[in-house]
Each structure stands twice: as C-alpha cells, then as structure tokens.
Image (cartoon, rainbow, N blue to C red):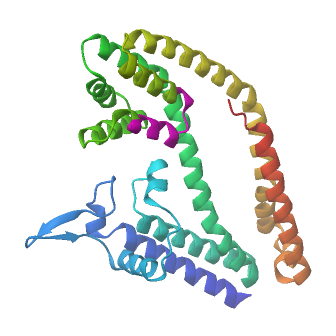
Amino acid sequence: MTSFLAIGVVFILISVVALGYALLQPDLASLRSEQMKVAVAHEGAAVEKSTPVYDLIERFLKTFGIKPFSEEELDLAGIKSNVTAVVATTLLIAFLAFAGTLALTTSLFFAIVVMLVAPMSVKVYVGWKTGRRRTAFSAQMAEAMTLLSSALKSGMNVPNALGSVASEMEAPMGEELARIVNETRLGRDLIAGMRDTSARMESEDFLWVTEAVAIQRESGGRLTEILDRVTETIAQRNELRQRVHALAAEGKASAGILMGLPVIIGVLLMVVNRPVMMPLFTTGAGNMLLLVAAGFYLLGGLWLRSIVRVKL
C-alpha cells in the first residue's frame, strides 16, 4: 500500500510540474486568449509560437490521424483554444485522475478505469458549453432584433445593420452576427450565412428572421414591420421558456443533489472509515460491484436528465 501511495504522490507531483510547464511558458503566457498559437513574421516566413509539449501532441495526432475534437466543434462551444491545446488539457485531466485515484484507492485497476473515463468529462464539458451558448443566443434574440429593426429604420441596409448590432451585442450573438457580416464581405450570400447560423445555433427564432429577410429581398415590402412582429413573437416565446425553466428548476436541483450524494458520501467514507471502503477497490468482487454501480449511476443520470429537460 505504501508503494502505491508513493507512486500516486509522484504522479501528482509530475502532473503539477507538467501543468506549470504548459501554462507558465513565456510564449504561451503572452498569447491572446482567442488563440493558442499566433503566426509571427520572422525573416520573411510565418513562425508559430508553441511549446515542445504542444508540438509533440500535434505530431502524434497528425501521424495517427486522430482528431478527438474539430475546430468547428470547439468554436461552436465558444472555446478559444485549438485542438492541440484541448487535447493537452484532456491528457492532463486523465493523468491527474489516474494519479489521484491511485493515491486514494491504491487500486491500479480502478485508477486505469477512471483514467479512461476522465477524457469523457472533457467531451461532456464541450457539449455543455455548446448548449449554454445556444441558450444564451436564444435569450439575446429579442434584444438583437429590436436593435436590428431600429438600425433599419435609421436608413441602414441589412448587412450594415447586422454589423451595427454585432458591435453592440455581447457574445454569442455579437460573434455570430459578426461572422455573417464578415462572410458577406468575402462574397458569401447573406441569406446563406444567416441560415447557416440558425442551423449552427439550432435557433428557430433566427430562422424566422432569416426567412423574413429572404422574403423581403424577393418580393419587397417593409422589413421593419415584419421584424417588429417577429420580435414580439420571439419575446413571448422567451417569456414562456423562462417560465418553464423556472418551474423545472426544482426538479433540476433535486437531480443534481441525487447525482452528487453517492460521490460525496463515498469520498467522506474513504476519509472517515477507509478500511471499510477498501475491499471495493482491492478485491475482484468489489471492482465488479463498483462497475455495476457506475452503470446504474449513469443510467439513473440519463433518466433524470430526460425527466427534467424541457425543450420548447
């Protein structure tokens, strides 16, 4: 047991050193938060600032053709890091999970299982960030369309009005509208860009606005009047959505408590009465029980999620 604890402590120390090396490099510390690599001019050529760790991971991914995340997936989640940086963070999380579990349970088998499961948490986090970003986008729709209608009434055309709204709105609405404006300036059709954004953000409300702009371009008419009606409908939908979320808040809180209790109690028992819990990690029967419990835990979490999740 002492040897396993020593190995766990050593792994934790190595992980801390690796984290400090990755985060405290002078080149990385000076980078903007919008990107992990910046091309700089050096003797007439573009040179990328990076670290040996990131270069090694990038070469490994290219050699074996592995791409656990796509740039579009990270961009949709609002994560301003490249794939290499996210993979490095995922590996560090898995390493820390392995070291911490090994030091806590002294079970190599369970530590390996936790290490393999840990990267899934990053994937879940990316999905969670994507959902939050889409929700925030929908919540900003009414305000954005009000500003768009006001800009059109002042005499601006649609692209300029979208650019004006993009400069005034916060993320994610401002970023998505800025994307549309930039793509339009590069020659892409405005309606195609707006439809792509509505699909990316899974927003029916923005699709309504897109179709309103498309109809106005084909048949004419006053777009501001259409936008005012659409904005009123969007505001009513947002109000209904907020009421439903408020009614479901109690169920979500209960689900969170039910999901957190087994983990918290297990950790407390490991601290208070370690010998009682150790057979779960040091015996084959205990490992089987933990795997079965983890399976039921996951099944119960998915069931609770389906109950408290309300989609309008």
Residue drawn at (54%, 33%) of the image: 203
Residue 238, position in %: x, y?
Answer: 59, 22
Compared to residue 181, the image places residue 33 above or below, namely below
Question: Magenta stretch?
Answer: 192-205
On screen, residue 102 versus residue 175, left or right, reads right
Position of the N terminus, as image quadrant, is: bottom right
Compared to residue 98, the image places residue 294 above or below, namely above
On screen, residue 62 versus residue 274, left or right, reads left
The residue nearer to you, when weighing 48 against 180, is 180
Position of the C terminus, as image quadrant, is: top right
Q: Furthest-right residue in view? A: 285
The residue nearer to you, when weighing 279 against 236, is 236
Q: Furthest-left residue in view? A: 43
Residue drawn at (51%, 40%) of the image: 199
Q: Furthest-bottom residue in view? A: 3
Q: Is 204 a magenta residue?
A: yes
For the question of whether residue 144 can be seen, the reply is: no
Quadrant position of residue 99: bottom right
The residue nearer to you, when weighing 62 against 135, is 62
